[in-house]
Image: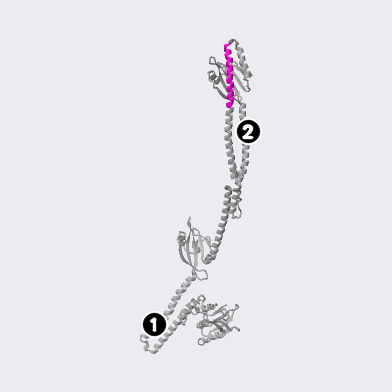
Amino acid sequence: MKLLRSFRTIQAKLIIMVLLLILIALQLIGVYFVSTMKNSLIESFTDNLNKQAQMLTVLAGSAITNQEDAGSAEERGQSELVQLVGNLFNISGVETQVLDASGRVLATSLEEHQSYVGRKNTSLLVSRALQGINDNTEEIIDTDNIRKKIVVKPVMNESKDKVVGAVYIVASMKDLYQTVERVNQIFVTGMLLALGLTALLGILIAGTITQPIKALTRQATAVAEGRFEERVPVLGKDEIGQLSLAFNEMTDRLSEALSINEEEKEKLSSILSNMSDGVLATDEIGRVIVANRRARTMLSLEDLEGRTASECLVIDKEPISEALEGKESILLIRRQPEDEESLVFRVTLTPIRRRDKGVVGSIAVLHDVTESEKLEQTRREFVANVSHELRTPLTTIKSYAEALDDGAMEEPPLAERFVGVIRSETERMIRLVTDLLHLSRFDSRQAQLRRQTTDLAEMTEDVVDRFSLQLRQKAITVRVQVEPGLQKAWIDRDGIDQVLDNLMSNAIKYTLDGGSIVLSAKLTGAGQLSISVKDTGIGIPKKDIAHIFDRFYRVDKARSRSMGGTGLGLSIAREIVRAHGGTIGIESEPNAGTTVTVTLPMAQEGGEQP
């Protein structure tokens, strides 16, 4: 398996390719060279045989002609032919025969073939030569597996121009083919040496190509793993060197781009985490993939990722589906956490579009509009309450005025009572309008505090004196407790008098006959002034305490209105205390009494609050 993998490398492929090219080239050259050399040797060998045969035909022709002319001297002529082929043309590996016109062997050059003399040579080439055909050659493989060349030439009688015999030459080609075989061996040896040297040079040359590629591969792996500090060595100005330069530049740009991307991602994450609005991002099927901290707080859910947006927002799936189809929408949702007030969110659903894929998700932005909804509800209630508070006395005034106009003026006792009612309702409207104007000044920050040095003991005594008649009427006992050493305070005397008058008035109204009230002033552990009014009245239900300072809010609306209250006293008191930089709180239990505490910072004389 490792060997197979090694052959898949570029270096191995380059070496194999070069070796194959060299091998093919050498094979082609070798085949051409050996074939050409072989043909040249055979042609040269055949030419030599033809020349020898041609020379022998001339000599044999004279001997045969002489033998025919001198019939008595036949033996002498035959011995001449034997001497000719035995001595003059006795070549190693070559058999030479001289034939007469009938094809009988007259003489042979080989001693072992002397028995052929007198016999007829039946070779087809001999027949062709005796017919006067000059070009008679043939290549055969003998019984001893030796390749031989046969050349047969006709012997002509020049004077009579007729064939008088033939020369038959058989030459062994063993030495020629051995020479060709040695050349083949030399060529194969040279080819193997050339391939070995080529492989060695191929490894060295391929290394100069593959080493930079390996370096590029290592660098690419390092970049993929996030290591951008490494660089590819540039070993030249060739194509690989230019590629290395381009890769190093790409690494620098990629590192810079990723740094910018990470920075932008951190910015986006920081923005999402610190947004006052909740953000949910979904994928193309509506599952939440990103949620910021504010969204988790608003929805009271920690694990938002993986859930559907409709499940997280507790809404129908239709708005989410429309957003995933490319439609924007806005809706209000209400949530009611346990033991808390209901929350109102405005949800803006927007599709996420990608240029090449269209809509790939949606974004839900949650904006907490609970306060604005409360303000809007308060405004509506305020308008309704003001209208109601003004309409009641106006209706009474109108009714009594019409009664006076219809003749009640003629009855003095009745007219006097009607005029008294009209006067009372008018004063009630004046108080209401005055309170509204007072609140309006605080809302518009136009109310200015007129601070002065105030004796706290004197101020508390004056409050009790202003309500002494009402206290005697209901037999309510009052105690004033001012902490020893606490004498002066830098406050708005008229404003705090108004706050204490309101608190004392409420305490008297809702305390039964024979009850008690404690008005106290002291310093807290934080160095602030604390003034409290504690009664033993009917108390306030727990569900109403959170709204007791709201404008026009009454625990018992019918009873409060019959007592002449406008529902704005505690609201005005809270605004006055806030203007001083303090707080006002209330503690109460039904049928156990109520304690209202005003806490004010101890400002220095001639200065503002600390």
**Which residue is identified by label 2?**
186
Q: Position of residue 467 (x, y in %)?
A: 51, 86
Q: Position of residue 606 (x, y in %)?
A: 56, 81
Q: Position of residue 147 (x, y in %)?
A: 59, 26
Query: Can you see residue 154?
Result: yes
Amino acid on which the number 2 mark rests in the picture: Ile
Q: Which residues are magenta?
A: 42-70
Q: Residue furthest top?
A: 72
Q: Is residue 334 magenta?
A: no
Amino acid on which the number 1 mark rests in the picture: Lys
Q: Residue at x 41, y 81 (%)?
A: 394
Asked whether 131 or 478 is in front, the reply is 131
Q: Is residue 606 above or below residue 193?
A: below
Asked whether 393 or 159 is in front, the reply is 159
Q: Are marks 1 and 2 in contact (CB under 8 Å)?
A: no
Q: Position of residue 120 (x, y in %)?
A: 57, 17
**Which residue is identified by label 1?**
398
